[in-house]
Amino acid sequence: MDSLRLYVRLIACSLRGQLAYRATFLTKLVGNFAVTVFEFLGIWALFTRFGTLGGWTLREVALLYGTVDVGFALADMLSRGFDRFGTILKAGEFDRMLLRPRSTVLQLLGYELRLFKLGRLAQGAIILAWAAGAVDWTPARVGLLGFSIAGTYALFLGIIVLQATSAFWTIETLEVWSAFTYGGNYAGEYPLSIYKRWFQRVFTAVIPLGLTTYYPARAILGRDDLDGFHAVAPLGGIVFAALAFGVWRLGLRRHASTGS
Amino acid sequence: MSGYLAIVAARFRSLLQYRAAALGGLFTQVFFGLVRIMILEAFYAASSTPAPMALPHVIGYIWLGQATLLLIPWRNDEDVAEQIRSGAVVYELTRPLDLYGIWLARSIAWRTAPVLLRMVPMFVIAMLVLPILAPEWALAPPSAASFALWIPCFAGAVLLSAAVSALMTVSLMWTIAGDGVAMLVATLATMFGGLIIPLPLFPDWARQIIYALPFAGLMDFPSRVFTGDIAPSGAAWVLAHQLAWTGALVALGRWLVSRGVRRLVVQGG
């Protein structure tokens, strides 16, 4: 409970800091919103030209797009400390965190909440709401959508934690990880079925994005029956995050500071 | 002139140091390239009506886009941004060089070294490795003429990109913490530069407008000259578009700097 209160205070500090530069904040927010709107306009343009994508309509793809964008935006907003971990480690800032009587995970999660990322979140939510208008909702489907977003959030958080953990070995945060964060977000906006077999396998078994977004979306859209498999599929993202935090603890044991 | 050339050369050499970063980015760029190709292949497979761009041209276009990704002006020149924030920009004013010229020279180096570092390994993968692993996804110019004409068009894109970057630097004189302007320009450039979808695939009514914008000259036109989607005879038009926009943006930048310097107040006199 005490941890939660501290977390809220850390976040509140970060928000006040960003709102001090109001004009910069607003342009960044608009910019972040515009980037994602343009991405969706690109998809819209392709659908106007080609009609369908592997048997999916634009509004069906929008459900996938909204789910993965909301999940990613949440993870991207709430994990800045892990995202910047290479810099934090290099500057010796992490050693100061270790001295404090609080868990490093809590301190890194509360490091900064980048408010302008609300732009992507808002855009994802709007697209999701538009897609939702065409879905035949049942309580089970509503629940599955919530679980799907939670699983996607957990999965991206897990990837960002792994990215941070790798910095214990490499010091720098390697750009390779963007393939899985931004690249995963991008690939997840489209139905998994359009990709090559090997790619589908990677995004189901290794990075279970297919489990957290694609299969739930099929059940919500009525393409598949909502059976036991579809109901538990998003759990894959949560298991992934749990494993990632396990690896983080291993890395932490190895940590030997960058200072002399 | 030699002063500006020295700035370009020094900056170019220092930017060439970031070789590991370029290799780290390579994996991500190949990944994005593969995903984009698979998505567009799926769209093409679903459609029976002929598209305004053939699929092999689209594939080549995607690889060239990934190779020259850093022609898109993503960020501000942080060194100059810091100078403007701290007031150190006055030192630049004491040099026997024009302030805008210094910034343009820095931008030219910034739009060359990092692009080349990423382009060369990307070409090796797309032109030499992919023909063995996945021949249908490989990159190859249709003729020697297309490749030869791509080179000046690429140079034109570098100049145009540098002019856009210099203009972003100039905007810092007014905004101080100008991440917002950089973000807006980068957004427009990704959309109207052909990084989200190839420009010929936009709806017909929108295309003529998008082609007229400066962003089309950064990545879209040169890539299409390379793949043969724009015939060799069209290359002259591409160069004219790039140079006209470069000239206009440079003139605008110079004018803005001369106004900005007039109202510049240096604290601590």
Image: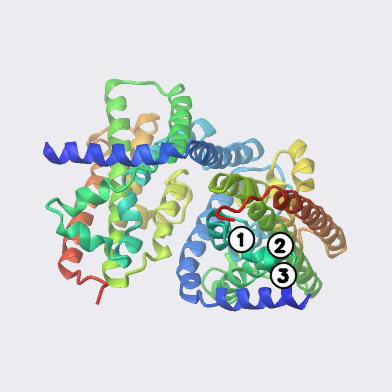
Q: Residue at x 67, y 74 (%)?
A: B7
Closest to the observer, B172 or B112: B172
Residue placed furthest toward the front: B269
Q: How far apart are the two marked residues, 2 and 3, measured between alpha carbons?
A: 40 Å
Question: Vertical placement of A40 versus B76: above or below?
Answer: above
Task: Say left or right for B28 vs A246.
Answer: right
Local secondary structure at mark 3: loop
In the rendered image, the quadrant that contains the C terminus of chain A is bottom left
Q: Nearer the viewer, residue B1 or A217?
A: B1
- Would you name the residue on which mark 2 appears? B99
Residue A257 x/y as whole percent: 23, 70
Badge 1 and badge 2 both on one subunit = yes
Cβ atoms at labels 1 and 2 below 8 Å apart: yes
Q: Amino acid at mark 2?
A: Leu
Asked whether the viewer can see residue B226, the reply is no
User: From this viewpoint, is residue B265 visible?
Assistant: yes
Q: Which residue is mark 3?
A: B141
On the rendered structure, is B127 left or right of A113? right
Residue B90 appears at what percent x and percent y? 63, 61
Q: Judge by depth and name the residue closer to the eye, B149 or B51.
A: B149
Q: Quadrant of residue A86?
A: bottom left
Q: Chain of mark 2?
A: B
Q: For this view, does A49 lie left or right of residue A260?
A: right
> Are the numbered discs 2 and 3 placed on the same chain, yes or no?
yes
Q: Secondary structure at mark 2?
A: helix
**Residue of label 1:** B89
Are the residues flagged by discs 2 and 3 in contact, CB closer than 8 Å?
Answer: no
